[in-house]
Amino acid sequence: MSPGWYLRRLSRMGPREVAGRAGDVLRKRRRRREYLNPRRPNPLRRREFSNGLGTAALPDVPADAVKRLVESAEELLAGRAEYFGVVRDDLVAPDWSADPKTGRRAPTDAYAFDIAYRSEDAVGDIKQIWEPSRHQHLTVLAAAYALTGEERYASRVADHLKSWWAANPPLSGVHWVSGIELGIRLISWVWVRRLLDGWPGAPALFEDNPEALHQIWHHQRWLAAFRSQGSSANNHVIAEAAGQLAAAAAFPWFPESVGWRAEALRALDEHLRANTFGSGLNRELATEYHGLVLELGLAGALEAHAAGVTVPESTRLVLLRMFDALAAVVDATLRPPRQGDADDGHGLVLDGAGTDRWGSLLATGDALFGRRTWWPRVSGTDVRTPLLAALAPEALRVTAARPAARPVHLADAGMTILRSSAEGAEVWCRCDGGPHGFLSIAAHGHADALSIEVRHDGVDVFADPGTYCYHGQPEWRSYFRSTRGHNTLELDGTDQSTSGGPFLWTRHARTTVLTSEDTRWQAEHDGYATGKRPATHRRTVTLDGTQLHVTDEVRGDGEHAGQLSFHLGPEVDVELDGATARMVWPGRGGLATAVLDLPADLTWSAHRGETEPPLGWYSPGFGRREPAWVLVGSGGVRGGTTLTTLLRFDR
């Protein structure tokens, strides 16, 4: 990163964080000696794995969930998998440091903290390298063994673990740089050992294997020394605490295990509470990270319980509220909002491709905590729910007040969900009136104040375009997190908040919700309230059956260059005639249609799949993008300007 980035990053830290990071630098210098001459653990003599599932839970896994799992396991045995849009067929014996996207290979014989892992020139796309080494494909293979008894799945797991351990000695290479990677990897190893419990080779692979003990000990020792802190204490610190707790509870094979477990349980409780609003939504206001943190918190808490450790009531209460919040915001198809960053991250993977992640989470919440009557019904099946429920039946339940009806407005997070029915099809509208993001850097936030998402029967009509990438493609990173990349108003060609880097915002727009009712929402933000011509953007949204009214007001002095954008989902086709847009998309019973009456004060144009600069794109998942229409209205706006938009669903 450039010197300017380091100065901007330093400006977002307080004195305590600066001191903590200075301590990290000193510890990394001392650990360099161990990189050259690694310490060996002193494991306890009596080592066994006692936290298995037994056989009672396995018959409870539905047959179709088993079928999906086995199909995915067969693909993995053939060496095939897809990571962030890149299809791989080299996973029979993978090169753990190779990036198939750029063709580059990260160094394996360098001290981890010397590697410029953010540089594609130095290592390739680090996400492509890290993801297979989370070993979540191994939990899929191990689950396939547990449910079928076929040893070829277990043998492949053993081959990959031995290969990884040999290729990645402690503190060497890029897999020892980031704590979130170590934490998630430990959770995977715990579940691999659990799912292979009936395999005769499991003890020799883990508790009786000096190399496994070496790796497990060094992973936990790393996490004890280099936990994320200060302005970086977001989902990363949850993964670090959950991974260390899971490993110390399931693998209590070292003199340090009891202390590691106690500290990790304390840290998980502290940071789950800090990362979660009272309403239950994750404070990063990035929906996929809500799912990630919930999965990580569950993994840690369940492992502690399985080891006979009491999980604090405050931890269980946060997890309960996170489930209730998820149930509150999903649409009729169980899809949550597409807010903020998303990188397809999972805390634990036990299911095959085609399993609905959000439906599975809600089913797990029902099994562990009990559902409220207003929760949406889950019709799909999964492997995860019966296995997690068997590990700790009702152990996490907590007595607490819960919403009696489905919340419309989660006030602390500034999220409002308006709903109505259009001839049996749900109209779902998310209104964004919350903080810009979490902590001083708001790493995973977007410049999307007052933006809206609108769905018709689960189909994106006004879509949040998504994330697409993190490192290596700065123009695309900037577009997908920009104000013009969302369904809101941009003034004078600038974002509402000021970016200082790909995971750094140096100035945050502040939003105030003025009205929030079942069918009407109003809010404003101060992102343009500084400079020579300060202005405030106020938006009012009203949902009246099949009609959505959006009113944008510009308050302040002077004239501004305005750009109002409406990004359409990839299934929506559009014809634009002046200030009228006619939209059509595949619906349940045939084609669905709507008419969009746009503000005539602006000049409207339609764009799709443009690259210089990027405009008109939708990212269905990390590393993937596809063309989608965006309607852009441009023109001069001044204080007192009111722009009115009307969306009318025909069927």
Image: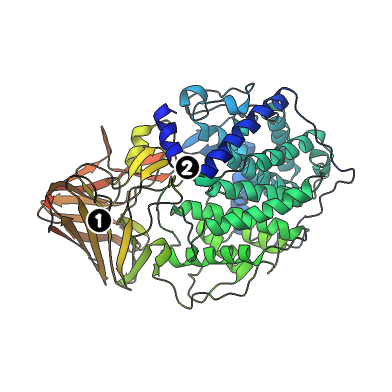
Residue 529 location (% of width, % of height):
24, 51
Give whichever of 540, 23 is nearer the camera: 23
CB-based contact (under 8 Å), mark 2 and mark 1: no
Q: Residue at x 58, y 47 (%)?
A: 237
- Residue at the far right: name it: 45
**Residue at the spot of label 2:** 13
Image quarter in which the C terminus is found? bottom left
Looking at marks 2 and 1 on the same chain, the residue that comes earlier in the sequence is marked by 2
Image quarter in which the N terminus is found? top left
- Name the amino acid, label 1: Val
- Residue 37 in the figure: left or right of residue 426: right
What kind of element bears circle 2? loop
Label 1: how many Cα within 10 Å (few below 14, some 14–19, many 20+): some
- Residue 453 in the figure: left or right of residue 311: left
Q: Is residue 524 above or below residue 375?
A: above
**Residue at the spot of label 1:** 584
What kind of element bears circle 1? strand
Q: Residue at x 28, y 44 (%)?
A: 495
Residue 259 visible somewhere in the drawing:
yes
Give whichever of 77, 23 is nearer the camera: 23
Residue 461 location (% of width, % of height):
30, 56
- Residue 306 in the figure: left or right of residue 63: right
Residue 229 falls in image quadrant: top right
Residue 97 visible somewhere in the drawing:
no
Give whichever of 551, 632 is nearer the camera: 551
- Name the amino acid, label 2: Met
